[in-house]
């Protein structure tokens, strides 16, 4: 009996992935595996657009609230967790659905991960110190001199990825581009995946949605949520949790580095830049099934696609 593919509902931030998965759960015994590097953190609910408690009671979600913001979580750990969950969900005769927009996690799960040098806390601290003095755009320019391909796909303020690319260069003397050109590890499974990608036919429409959503988050109490994190003495801007879009910019405001208005404008701009990077990754994935996320019947079309997949399972 051929095995059904694992359904992936992906798309840029603000594209309506969670709403589409909720519609799937109305029709089938679906369990959601979240593919999101921000919703893993406890106490970060509003700014990550985490499913509400009512939604979590109605639909089983996995990989939410699994880390404290002071902790880290890797793509390799996600891969192991997701594979175990897919197996367990199927053993319960339920349907695993991967839902989220952290593209590195999808890549790790589907294809395995390249072997990259391990992190160096000494070099990371040195890079943080340099960024504090010179700014991340200056380090982005430095990266462009040694690894133009990596720099071209990163925004000048993408501190986490700029730091990692420079760290790899300083640790190994080889660029991240060189490392990624090497063959990835074997994925270690025989699963197949079907990707539904919610993408905007009109980029400006998604930008407007992102703006309204961020202001709605502020109305819902995002400032208080970030302030509670900011008051913790064990959290700092070098952590992946604090670097999440929206949190990073409001944190800078609470530190007194920028005005509240500037923080909000930068948060919206950073969210749009994130969406752009996600779309770039998705458009390099030709086998995806694209649905216009701005269409009023987008969620219904996701349901229709799921029905088609269930009637025509793929072979492993």
Image (cartoon, grey):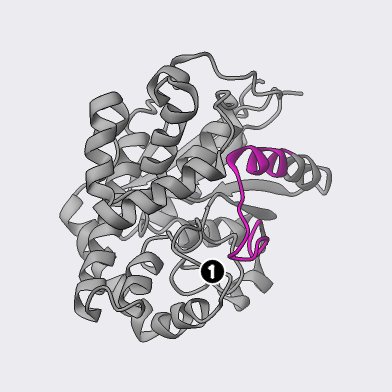
| Residue lying at 44% horizontally and 16% vertically, measured from the top left | 181
Report the front residue among 127 and 232: 127
Whether residue 30 sits left or right of residue 129 in the image: it is right
Examine the image and state in which quarter residue 315 appears: top right
Magenta stretch: give its range: 63-83
As drawn, which residue projects farthest toward the right? 91
Report the front residue among 229 and 203: 229
Whether residue 295 sits left or right of residue 69 in the image: it is left
* SS at circle 1: loop
Q: Position of residue 55 (x, y in %)?
A: 59, 72
Examine the image and state in which quarter residue 78 appears: top right
Q: Position of residue 172 (x, y in %)?
A: 49, 23
Taking 40 as reference, is 141 above or below it?
above
Q: How many marks?
A: 1
Does the magenta-highlighted stretch encompass residue 80?
yes
Report the front residue among 194 and 106: 106
| Residue lying at 26% horizontally and 72% vertically, measured from the top left | 263
Whether residue 105 sits left or right of residue 201 in the image: it is right
The residue carrying mark 1 is: 235
Q: Position of residue 308 (x, y in %)?
A: 53, 37
| Residue lying at 45% horizontally and 35% vertically, measured from the top left | 167
């Amino acid at each position: 009996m051929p095995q059904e593919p694992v359904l992936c509902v992906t798309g840029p931030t603000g594209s309506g992935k969670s709403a589409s998965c909720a519609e799937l759960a109305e029709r089938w015994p679906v369990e959601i595996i979240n593919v999101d590097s921000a919703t893993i953190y406890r106490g970060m609910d509003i700014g990550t657009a985490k499913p509400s408690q009512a939604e979590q009671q109605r639909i089983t979600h996995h990989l939410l609230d699994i880390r404290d913001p002071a902790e880290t979580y890797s793509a390799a750990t996600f891969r192991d967790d997701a594979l175990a969950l897919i197996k367990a969900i199927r053993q319960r005769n339920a349907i695993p659905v991967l839902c989220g927009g952290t593209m590195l996690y999808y890549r790790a799960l589907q294809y395995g991960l390249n072997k990259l040098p391990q992190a160096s806390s000494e070099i990371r601290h040195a890079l943080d110190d340099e960024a504090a003095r010179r700014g991340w755009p200056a380090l982005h320019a430095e990266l462009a001199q040694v690894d133009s391909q990596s720099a071209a796909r990163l925004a000048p303020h993408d501190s986490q990825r700029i730091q990692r690319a420079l760290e790899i260069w300083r640790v190994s003397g080889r660029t991240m581009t060189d490392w990624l050109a090497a063959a990835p590890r074997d994925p270690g499974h025989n699963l197949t995946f079907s990707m539904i990608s919610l993408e905007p036919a009109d980029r400006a429409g998604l930008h407007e949605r992102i703006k309204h959503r961020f202001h709605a988050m502020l109305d819902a109490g995002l400032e208080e949520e970030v302030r509670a994190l900011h008051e913790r003495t064990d959290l700092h801007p070098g952590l992946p949790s604090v670097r999440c879009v929206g949190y990073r910019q409001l944190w800078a405001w609470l530190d007194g580095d920028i005005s509240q208005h500037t923080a909000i404008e930068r948060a919206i701009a950073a969210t749009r830049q994130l969406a752009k990077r996600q779309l770039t990754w998705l458009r390099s994935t030709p086998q995806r099934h694209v649905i216009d996320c701005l269409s009023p019947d987008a969620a219904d079309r996701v349901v229709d696609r799921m029905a088609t997949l269930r009637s025509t399972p793929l072979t492993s």
